[in-house]
Image (cartoon, helix red, strand yellow):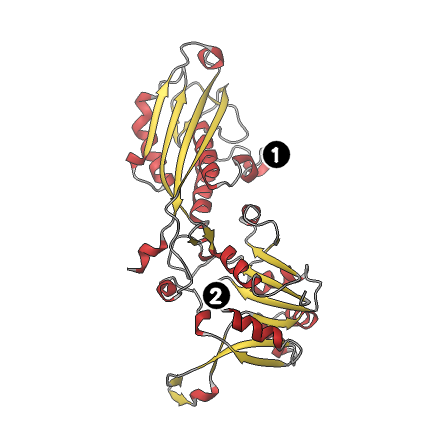
């Protein structure tokens, strides 16, 4: 062990990233970027532990990928996320890296670790070769350096530095503010930072995503309830009864949500919207689906198509098919022809045949978002 903990920060919203998925979820072959970065840097040295600081809405999903890491919920800012991660550090030193730097070479990690006792924070830097202007003045470029991550700090000093009210853009700035010592080592152009998306073509270690497709199924059943509005596929259907449920009971949308989560390997609707939570009492299922579609997109998938089977004695489904398809197409952000509905009765058998409930079964297909197509 090198008495050092590695923290990988990937809790951000990617607000400046001009590609649909969050940058930490871009797939490289079959791996999300955060996993590639964590495994890559962890392979360079014998870290005491590796802590992944993740967005709270993605934390449980991330745990599916590698059980050897420790996962911690991030905060609203980079600094809050670092403070959250540091609560679980017991080693003398902490190395913090941003998931945006995907291709940090082993030599940079070796330099950081080799010099960890020389200052409170060890920082990789790059010299500037172009002419530099500050305001309207040309300044000496030899005095200008570009700061990179990862940075390696004395854990107690870093915790002390981050306890200030001021916000800092990197570890060294925070440590400087409390008069801590800084030691600079040579960085690498390979440690290019992924910020806007346009940098992807310059980051050589990233491979194209796999072309695999992923299938998931969902099934939901709701009994009827008198004197309640019926919503199916996001539209109101004229009926003397609706669906008995904690939310508005849109059985078609609930089935679709489960099929999407199944295809992504992300659990089920109850894990996202538990029926024990009062905030979902009477909830509009369209809003729930919009949240799941955003999640599916954020973690790196595209929806290919949905196929839905509705088993109902009542109401009659055929008169509403086009309206439901239009509604679901808008909610899923896919063309109408990629959302199919099949409807049948139960031939008067069972609880469906007795007009007590309806059943909806859905099948969803997802694929990885192909960020390589954005390079051209």
For image coordinates 37% across by 59% down, the residue present is 18
> Does any portion of residue 163 appear in the rendered image?
no
Which quarter of the rendering shows the C terminus?
bottom left
Give percent across and percent down for residue 211. 36, 46
Q: Which marked residue is nearer to the observer: mark 1 or mark 2?
A: 2
**Which is nearer the eye, 187 or 100?**
187
Dot 2 falls on a residue whose secondary structure is loop
**According to the image, label 1 marks what residue?**
276
Mark 1 secondary-structure assignment: loop
Q: Residue at x 47, y 27 (%)?
A: 219
| Residue sitting at x 67%, y 62% | 48
From what the image shows, is residue 32 above or below residue 98? above
Closer to the camera in the image, 131 or 149: 149
The residue closer to the viewer here, 134 or 235, is 134
Which of the two discs, 1 and 2, labels the residue nearer the N terminus?
2
> Residue 168 sits in which quadrant?
bottom right
Q: Give percent across and percent down for residue 182.
A: 61, 80
So how many labels did they put on this image?
Answer: 2
Residue 209 shows in the view: yes
Asked if the residue under mark 2 is in contact with the one under mark 1, i.e. CB atoms within 8 Å, the reply is: no
Q: What number is the disc on residue 101?
A: 2
The image position of residue 190, as x and y in percent, is 44, 70
> Is 214 placed above or below 321 here?
below
């Amino acid at each position: 062990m090198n008495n050092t903990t590695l923290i990988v920060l990937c809790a951000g919203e990617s607000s400046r990233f001009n590609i649909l998925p969050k940058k930490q979820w871009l797939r490289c072959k079959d791996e999300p970027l955060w996993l590639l970065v964590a495994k890559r840097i962890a392979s360079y040295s014998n870290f005491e532990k590796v802590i992944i600081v993740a967005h709270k809405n993605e934390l449980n999903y991330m745990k599916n990928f590698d059980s050897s890491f420790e996962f911690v919920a991030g905060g609203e800012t980079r600094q809050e996320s670092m403070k959250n991660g540091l609560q679980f550090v017991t080693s003398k030193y902490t190395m913090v890296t941003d998931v945006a730097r995907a291709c940090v070479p082993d030599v940079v990690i070796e330099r950081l670790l080799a010099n960890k006792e020389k200052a409170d924070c060890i920082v990789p830097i790059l010299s500037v070769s172009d002419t530099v202007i500050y305001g309207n003045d040309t300044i000496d470029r030899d005095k200008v350096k570009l700061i990179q991550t990862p940075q390696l700090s004395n854990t107690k000093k870093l915790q002390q530095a981050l306890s200030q009210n001021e916000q800092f853009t990197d570890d060294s700035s925070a440590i400087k503010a409390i008069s801590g010592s800084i030691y600079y080592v040579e960085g690498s152009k390979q440690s290019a930072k992924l910020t806007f998306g346009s940098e992807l073509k310059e980051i050589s270690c990233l491979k194209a995503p796999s072309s695999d497709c992923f299938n998931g199924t969902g099934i939901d059943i709701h009994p009827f309830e008198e004197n309640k509005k019926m919503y199916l596929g996001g539209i109101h259907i004229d009926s003397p009864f609706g669906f008995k449920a904690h939310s508005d009971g849109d059985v078609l949308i609930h089935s679709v949500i489960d099929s999407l989560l199944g295809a992504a390997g992300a659990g089920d609707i109850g894990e996202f919207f538990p029926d024990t939570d009062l905030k979902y009492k009477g909830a509009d299922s369209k809003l729930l689906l919009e949240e799941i579609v955003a999640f599916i997109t954020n973690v790196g998938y595209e929806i290919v198509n949905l196929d839905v089977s509705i088993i109902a004695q009542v109401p009659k489904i055929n008169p509403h098919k086009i309206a439901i398809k239009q509604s679901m197409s808008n909610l899923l952000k896919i063309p109408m022809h990629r959302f199919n509905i099949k409807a049948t009765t139960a031939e008067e058998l069972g609880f469906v045949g007795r007009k007590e409930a309806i059943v909806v079964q859905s099948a969803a297909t997802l694929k990885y978002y192909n960020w390589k197509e954005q390079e051209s």
